[in-house]
Image: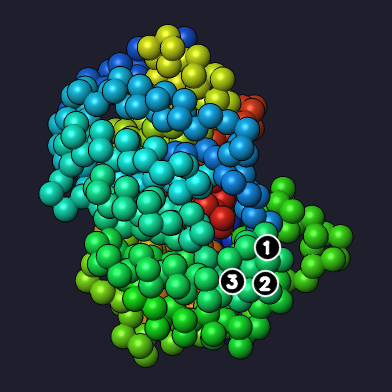
Amino acid sequence: MAVMKSLDVSPFYALNSALPFKDRWAVMPLQASLPVAPHEIEHNWQEIQNADLRGRKRLIYVHIPFCDIHCQFCGFYQNPLRKFDTSTYIDYLLKEISLEINNKAMQSAPIHAIYFGGGTPSALAAGQLARVIRYLKQYAPLAPDCEITVEGRISDFDDEKVDSYIEAGANRFSIGIQTFNTTIRQKLGRQSTEQEIIKNFERIASRDSVALVCDLMFGLPNQTIETWQRDLEIVNDLPLDGVDLYSLNLLPTTPLAKGVENNRIQLPSISDKCHFYHQGAEFLAKQGWVHLTNAHWAKTSRERNLYNFLIKQGSHFFGFGSCAGGKLDTHSYMLHRDLNQYYTQLDQGKKPLMMLTGKSLLGDWLHQLQAGIEKGRVDLIKLTDHSDLFDPLIKQWHQVGLLQDEEHCLRLTLSGRFWSSNILQALQQLLLQLNNPEHIELQNKMAQAKQAMKGHPVMPGAHSEKKHNQPISHH
């Protein structure tokens, strides 16, 4: 590797300690590989399926592309539940899984986590999701402590569904609440009231059989310090095992974004969001919660947040279901989002691939960086031979309160963890110049190739937070 004498870090300097950046930057995943030509996809896919995929943790993502209602903030609404036969979808989903369940790629090492995302998995009729869980429990090489997560809306988790998930083998529920405040919820298209939500959580928790996790969101319309504090106190009082605190990311295609554009709705400022994050993190710390990753806290040892963290480490993950994405042996892939195309490919006995990339052209430094940022600790010495070139940036970030000190092992402060997407984006671009300078021009070509493709399915794993907050991909 050629020695670089200098590195211009000044474009990534923070402004000041009160507001280090004007806004949070969306984390744009580096385009680390090129799409495979359509006529080569089938051959390449078979090679991947016959590979021995060891050496990294392994995950399964199952996508359920249906929603009962369209929440105002969500940009991932696709298929209205009432218009589709979900039983047929489950039949085809199991057919897809059966195509590769016995292949060497799947069977070569344990699976450590399974995530049912969407869409709204809990919107399916009782028993449908359980069919898939049971199948995977029976035929996939699951680790003894495999985390199996079902995500959904609290109003869907009735006794029949809860019992079917648990009996089939699910051991973690991730339930999107956003806020307990009844007035704010109803304006977002969510119907359950504060008291109904509390009773439902208590009812589920009484089984004492799963890690129970709640998602909260800050930066919502009409949210105040007082309403946010009430949300935090309810979370702390409930028998939960984990909580996510996500910042609202206003996606341009959502009903909420249109309301903001028309000046019908006002949102809290970026300064307000920063305050909400600090308020939440400091409150949870005082109550004894453990800060696992930037947006996630655990109250008990039952909660590990395994899938969401392992994704950032560059784990192999098998993707199943219309609109799903996966990554095996650094090959990324996307499945058809159109259900008719998805079904047609499966009728022909084929994996319904819409896109497949070649192997990653970058080293493992990118995954180490992403995983480190999530944990609030990045050791630059392990990522580059030229960590001293970052000294001016480290000093400046420390001065404005983003870093705890000026060491080459960067330890993020609470402010740094709020602005983690900006820090990640900056380090990503600078390390690319140092470690893979030849890739910068190629990256521009890849971006153009991606732009030429139409319709991008959700790829879990590229999410920086969760499906309602991410630039592309996870949930």
Q: Alpha-carbon distance for marks 3 and 1? A: 12 Å
| Label 2 neighbour load within 10 Å: few <14, some 14-19, many 20+ | some
The residue that mark 1 highlights is: 188
Residue 108 lies in quadrant: top left
Q: Can residue 35 be seen from the camera position used here?
A: no
Q: Secondary structure at mark 3?
A: loop
Which residue is disc 3 drawn over? Answer: 193
The residue at the point 20 percent across, 23 percent down is 102
Q: Is residue 285 visible?
A: yes
The location of residue 111, given as percent across then percent down, is 21, 42
Foreground residue among 432 and 103:
103
Assess disc 3: are there few (<14), some (14-19) or many (≥20) residues with their C-alpha within 10 Å of its C-alpha. some
**Image check: 147 left or right of 27?**
left
Tell me which corner region of the image, top left, top right, bottom left or bottom right, holds residue 33: top left
Where's residue 310, x and y in %? 30, 52
Residue 461: x %, y % from top left: 42, 47
Which residue bears the numbered disc 2?
Answer: 184
